[in-house]
């Protein structure tokens, strides 16, 4: 990753990652190509989302996710894939959603950076 994260942040994300399911950018591309039904949620900040995002992604920023998720996705069994800039915040978000009772949550490792670097389609 290009960004150096603080030790405390890495500690909490490593802990969250021990409890969540992760997938790769290639996995998400394959699921989309196969027409698999899931909700893709971008948990980045508003300004990050505005500069570009994965087509079809629902934007619910990490800071308001717990507040807004039940209104956006009331069924806790809905398949959800979360992404952020690199896969750290989405792991924290996945862990939080699991704590709220969501049962089919995945964090996309590599996030937006991995998506763009792999030539994934971008929407602005």
Image (spheres, helix red, strand yellow):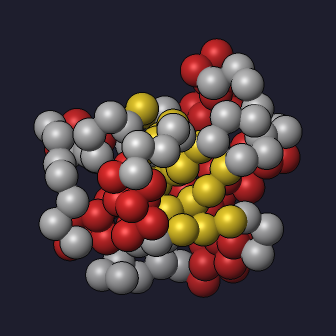
Up-down relation of residue 18 to residue 67 (above or below):
below
How many marks the image carries: the answer is 0
Residue 116 image point, x, y percent: 21, 64
Residue 98 pos. (x, y %): 79, 48
Instruction: Name the image quarter holding the C terminus.
Output: top left
Q: Position of residue 50 (x, y in %)?
A: 22, 37
* In this rendering, position of residue 62 left or right of residue 83: right
Examine the rendered structure and indicate whether residue 99 appears above or below residue 85: above
Q: Nearer the viewer, residue 56 or 90?
A: 56
Pick out the residue farthest to the top: 71
Position of residue 15 in the picture relative to residue 111 (left or right): right
Q: Residue at x 58, y 32 (%)?
A: 64
Residue 87 visible, this angle: no
Q: Residue at x 42, y 32 (%)?
A: 58
Place residue 53 in its image quadrant.
top left
Residue beneath the point at 63% across and 24% down = 73
The N terminus sits in image quarter: bottom left
Q: Is residue 6 visible?
A: yes
Residue 35: percent from left, percent from top: 41, 43
**Relative side of 61 to 52, left or right:** right
* Residue depicted at 41% across the width and 33% down the height: 59
Relative to 6, say whether 53 is above or below: above
């Amino acid at each position: 990753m290009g960004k150096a994260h603080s030790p405390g942040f890495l500690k909490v994300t490593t802990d969250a990652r021990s409890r969540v399911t992760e997938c790769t950018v290639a996995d998400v591309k394959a699921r989309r190509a196969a027409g698999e039904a899931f909700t893709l949620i971008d948990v980045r900040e508003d300004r990050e989302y505005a500069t570009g995002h994965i087509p079809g992604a629902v934007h619910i920023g990490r800071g308001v996710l717990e507040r807004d998720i039940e209104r956006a996705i009331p069924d806790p069994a809905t398949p959800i894939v979360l992404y952020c800039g690199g896969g750290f915040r989405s792991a924290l978000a996945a862990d939080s959603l699991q704590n709220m009772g969501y049962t089919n949550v995945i964090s996309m490792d590599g996030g937006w950076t991995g998506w763009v670097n792999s030539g994934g389609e971008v929407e602005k």
